[in-house]
Image (cartoon, helix red, strand yellow):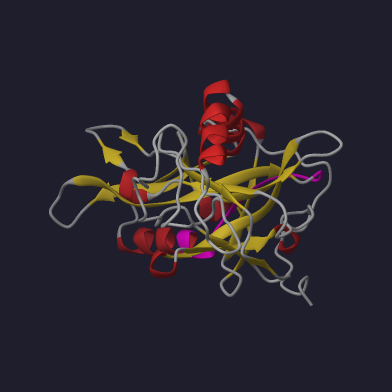
Amino acid sequence: MRIGLNIVRRKAEPLDITARVALDRMERAGYLPELRGIAQSTCVPFWWHGYSSDGTYKIHHNGTICFLKTGMRIVGVTAHHVFDKYRMALEIDPQTRCQFGGTTIEPISRLISENRYLDLATFDLSTVVVAAAGATAHVPIHWPTQEVKTTEVAIYGGYPGSLREEHETTADIPFQWFAGSPLSVTPENLKLHIDMEHFHQPLHGAKLSNWDLGGMSGGPVFRLVTTPIERLELAAFIYESQPNLSLVYARPSHYITQDGSIDAQSAA
């Protein structure tokens, strides 16, 4: 499992030694692993595989899909461009097989709603499908949830394809995560900054093992709520990263209604 904790500072000053020691201590004590485990448990790779042009069997691509219970149904959410790439692969080779985590699925038959502009797609799922995928659907107190504030900590992640290791009949796709306050928040999106210069990974120092985040699209963004009971609350969905600017973008949860449809007017 690849992990990273990125603390965003307004002036991008480096973490002092006290802060670094405190983060390392939270990792050893199990607090950060617990947060990481909660975030990871709600999402799995959205991946598809089949024969390549040279006749070998391989994974074509992967993104991330996360699961939640809205109070009305269980919904899977990913980025539209991830779903669209799968459909294009299926057109080229109708034998292409798709999986959500560990379970084979036909996403097209489960599609609820899609929006190319917002880069979101939603799917109707069941408890059995989510469990077979190897995940647990997030259960918010209410849906949609509040947006993350720039004064709060956001925890976000997904499954970058660059970390994928393919074996003869299986594949390992590690989860990569970050944490930090959003750089900016609007009704349309969250802008998250991964501070490459001052990055700190607990117990491992400043080296970021992977910056190619392709495959994290569709991944969840949680806000860390500290009162009255500390918890994670699903607040947005990753749809783009810009490595040259060290930025990740996410759509707020209010675009997804309780029935799983996408409300393109909700930002108005």
Quadrant where the C terminus sits is bottom right
- Label tally: 0
Occupied quadrant, residue 256: bottom right
As drawn, which residue projects farthest toward the left? 54
Q: Choose between 120 and 267: the one closer to the eye.
A: 267
Occupied quadrant, residue 140: top right
Residue 55, image x, y percentages: 15, 50
| In the rendered image, the vertical position of residue 57 relative to residue 202, given as above or below | below
176 with respect to 91 (left or right): right
Occupied quadrant, residue 137: top right
Q: Is residue 72 magenta?
A: yes
As drawn, which residue projects farthest toward the front? 17
Look at the image and give the residue range highlighted in magenta. 71-82
Quadrant where the N terminus sits is top left
Residue 68, image x, y percentages: 68, 43
| In the rendered image, the vertical position of residue 87 relative to residue 268, given as above or below | above
199 with respect to 152 (left or right): left
110 with respect to 60 (left or right): right
- Residue at (69% x, 39% y) in the render: 138
Q: Choose between 95 and 75: the one closer to the eye.
A: 75
